[in-house]
Each structure stands twice: as structure tokens, then as C-alpha cells.
């Protein structure tokens, strides 16, 4: 085992587009961290990558963050990432994560344009984000950008990307999806771009980021050289990983599993639910095709199917991989290649 994911299921409020398991800030945070520490202590491993996501990990008190990070054993040179929102970054938070070995931060910016931020229900503004980034003082910073959001245009998208490029070594740029169970799914917001406009925004982001030195290494992820997320690459290369927390998914000993989206069940000590075997050839190929590097040695059947997908795939001496237009239709294209 080499990678660990810890889910922090707490937020100040629920964003209208978010379908990750999270609850409004509650008085169960101390009990939750204690349960996580208990599990970590039962698996005294030196993790090569660790990712603390949510939810909003930065809503935990500095004392609880120190307790959680203090139980985290890592290997020399490990990549340790924590997610945060600009509005919950404080000096005490920064001191807690720096002292706990965190060396990579992923911040949820989504947009640098006030009208778009309001449409997404995002608190704070650019000044808040800039102050948070300055306080963090971390070199390996990733910023999240959402594409295809209400009122977004190529010009407004460039405003956001330009802000990100001033600070971030890594940018995650992903299309808004109206997920079942979210407020946006029940009541789609006004100003949403149509499918063609969403596709154009995605391709525009890819071109802009490439022109500013950010290489696309996965469908929605771009990085300056050497700043790719090692943790997420481990997922996409079908590596096994351990997970902690309600709603978290793990992959160990050839089996995939998940915890129920139930904080009470997790605190009562209920274990994860088995999802069956993982890591077969088809799953490895499906995950590899999310990456810009693709598959080095595609099967003869995949080579044959690729022949009917001109413009969406590239098949050459390096192997098989999707184009950016292919990434836009990745589920369909990958399904065709693997069917």
C-alpha cells in the first residue's frame, strides 16, 4: 500500500452543485477525528501520498488538524495534500498544516469573476482568495476552476485562468455537471451555457493553459512540469489505496470498497462495504485512457475500433490516447474502444 485518502465530511454550508458527502458544521468533529486517528493507528504504514479532502478540511479547528496530521505517518519525500476553501484559511490553519507535513494544497476557487461566483453560491471574493494564498505560502498550490458555469464566456474564463496562473503550479479545470440530489439538479440556475458552449469553453481552457506552460496530463488536470498530482496519478494508473471516512472509496488486495454515506455509521465503527474485484485489464485501460499518456500497448481489438474514431483518438507508435475532443466525450469514446 502506498496511498491514503481521508474524507472530512464537514462544510460551513452545502454548495448547490456539490454531490460529495458532507454535512453542515456539527459538534461531531472531535469524535470524527478521533475515529480517523484510531483507524490510522491500526495501520502504521508510511504513506507515499496522502490526500485529505472533503467536504472542507479547513473547517476543522487547528487543534483537530494537528491531531489528525500527527497520526499520519509518511515516507520520505511523500506528497501530502489538503483541500481548503479561501474563506476558511487562517494563520492557525496554515501553521497546523505546515507543522503536520502538508506540502501541497488544493484550493477551491472555481471562478475569479464575481457574477459567476455568486451564481455558484461561493462565499468570498478575489481579495479573500489572494489573502488565503499569501497566508498559505505553499509552493505546490493547485486551484480548482469550474467550466460551463452560469454566465461564463471565453473572456471571463480567461480572467479566472489568468488569476490562477499567477499563483498555481497545478490547475484542475472541470465541467459543471448537474448531479442528482443537488440543488442545481432540482432547479437549474439561469445563465447556463448550452452543450456546444460548454465544449467550446473546455477546449478554450485547454488551449489557454497549454499556451501558458500547463501541460494537460488528464481530462481535467493541468500542471507545470513536475507538479502533476502524484496521488491522483496513482488512482488513474490503477494503484491500490486505503481510504477513511463516510463516502470514501478504497482499493486494497484487489478489491474495491466504500464506506456508506453515513457519519453515524462510521462513528459507530461500521466497516466498509465490498464492491467486488478491481484492477482487471478493462478497468486499467479505462483509467489509462483518462490520461494524456493513454495506453502504451493497446490490444488488436482496440486498435481496430480506434480506426472508426478519427478526431477523437490518436493511434501511433506511442500507443493509443484520446484527443481533447475525445476527452469531451470520454465515456462514449472509451466505451466504444473497450466494448
Image (cartoon, rainbow, N blue to C red):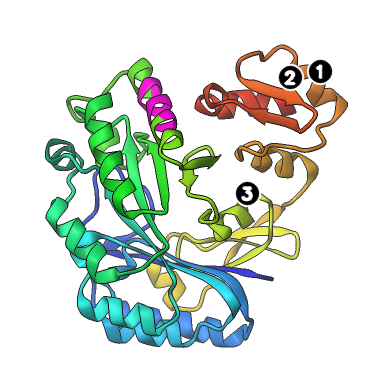
Nearest the viewer among 82 and 269 is 82
Specify whether 166 is left or right of 273: left
Q: Picture quarter containing residue 251? A: bottom right
Q: Is residue 110 above or below residue 190?
A: below
Q: Are marks 2 and 1 in contact (CB under 8 Å)?
A: yes
Q: Quick one: SS at disc 1?
A: helix
Q: Mark 3 or mark 2: which comes first in sequence? A: 3
Query: Gap between marks 3 and 2, in whole Å?
Result: 21 Å
**Residue under label 3:** 236
Q: Residue furthest front?
A: 212
Q: Which residues are magenta?
A: 199-207
Q: Mark 1 or mark 3: which comes first in sequence? A: 3
Numbered circle sitting on residue 304:
1
Badge 3: how crowded within 10 Å, few (<14), some, or many (20+)? some
Nearest the viewer among 280 and 133 is 133
**Residue under label 2:** 306
Query: Gap between marks 2 and 1, in whole Å?
Result: 5 Å
Specify whether 130 is left or right of 335: left
What residue do we see at 81% from left, 18% from top? 304
Q: Position of residue 65 (x, y in %)?
A: 35, 81
Query: Where does the C terminus fall, quadrant-wise?
Result: top right
Q: Is 205 one of the magenta-colored residues?
A: yes
Specify whether 15 is left or right of 248: left
Q: Is residue 203 above or below residue 116?
A: above
Amino acid at each position: 500500500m502506498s496511498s491514503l485518502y481521508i474524507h472530512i465530511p464537514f462544510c460551513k454550508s452545502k454548495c448547490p452543485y456539490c454531490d460529495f458527502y458532507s454535512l453542515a458544521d456539527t459538534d461531531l468533529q472531535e469524535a470524527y477525528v478521533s475515529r480517523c486517528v484510531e483507524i490510522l493507528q491500526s495501520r502504521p504504514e508510511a504513506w507515499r501520498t496522502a490526500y485529505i479532502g472533503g467536504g472542507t478540511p479547513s473547517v476543522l479547528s487547528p487543534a483537530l488538524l494537528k491531531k489528525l496530521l500527527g497520526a499520519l505517518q509518511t515516507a520520505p519525500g511523500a506528497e501530502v495534500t489538503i483541500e481548503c476553501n479561501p474563506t476558511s484559511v487562517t494563520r492557525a490553519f496554515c501553521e497546523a498544516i505546515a507543522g503536520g507535513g502538508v506540502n501541497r494544497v488544493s484550493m477551491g476557487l472555481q471562478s475569479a469573476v464575481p457574477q459567476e461566483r455568486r451564481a455558484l453560491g461561493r462565499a468570498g471574493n478575489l481579495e479573500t482568495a489572494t489573502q488565503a494564498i499569501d497566508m498559505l505560502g505553499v509552493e505546490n498550490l493547485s486551484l480548482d476552476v469550474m467550466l460551463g458555469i452560469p454566465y461564463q464566456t471565453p473572456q471571463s474564463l480567461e480572467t479566472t485562468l489568468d488569476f490562477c496562473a499567477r499563483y498555481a503550479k497545478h490547475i484542475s479545470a472541470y465541467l459543471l455537471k448537474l448531479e442528482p440530489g443537488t440543488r442545481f439538479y432540482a432547479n437549474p440556475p439561469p445563465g447556463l451555457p448550452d452543450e456546444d458552449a460548454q465544449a467550446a469553453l473546455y477546449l478554450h481552457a485547454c488551449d489557454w493553459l497549454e499556451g501558458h506552460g500547463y501541460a494537460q496530463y488528464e481530462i481535467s488536470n493541468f500542471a507545470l512540469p513536475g507538479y502533476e498530482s502524484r496521488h491522483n496519478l496513482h488512482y488513474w494508473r490503477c494503484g491500490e489505496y486505503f481510504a477513511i471516512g463516510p463516502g470514501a472509496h478504497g482499493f486494497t488486495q484487489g478489491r474495491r470498497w466504500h464506506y456508506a454515506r453515513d457519519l453515524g455509521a462510521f462513528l459507530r465503527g461500521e466497516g466498509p462495504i465490498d464492491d467486488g474485484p478491481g484492477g482487471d485489464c478493462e478497468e486499467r485501460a479505462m483509467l489509462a485512457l483518462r490520461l494524456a499518456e493513454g495506453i502504451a500497448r493497446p490490444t488488436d481489438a482496440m486498435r481496430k475500433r480506434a480506426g472508426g474514431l478519427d478526431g477523437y483518438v490518436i493511434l501511433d507508435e506511442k500507443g493509443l490516447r484520446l484527443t481533447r475532443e475525445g476527452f469531451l466525450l470520454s465515456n462514449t469514446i472509451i466505451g466504444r474502444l473497450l466494448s
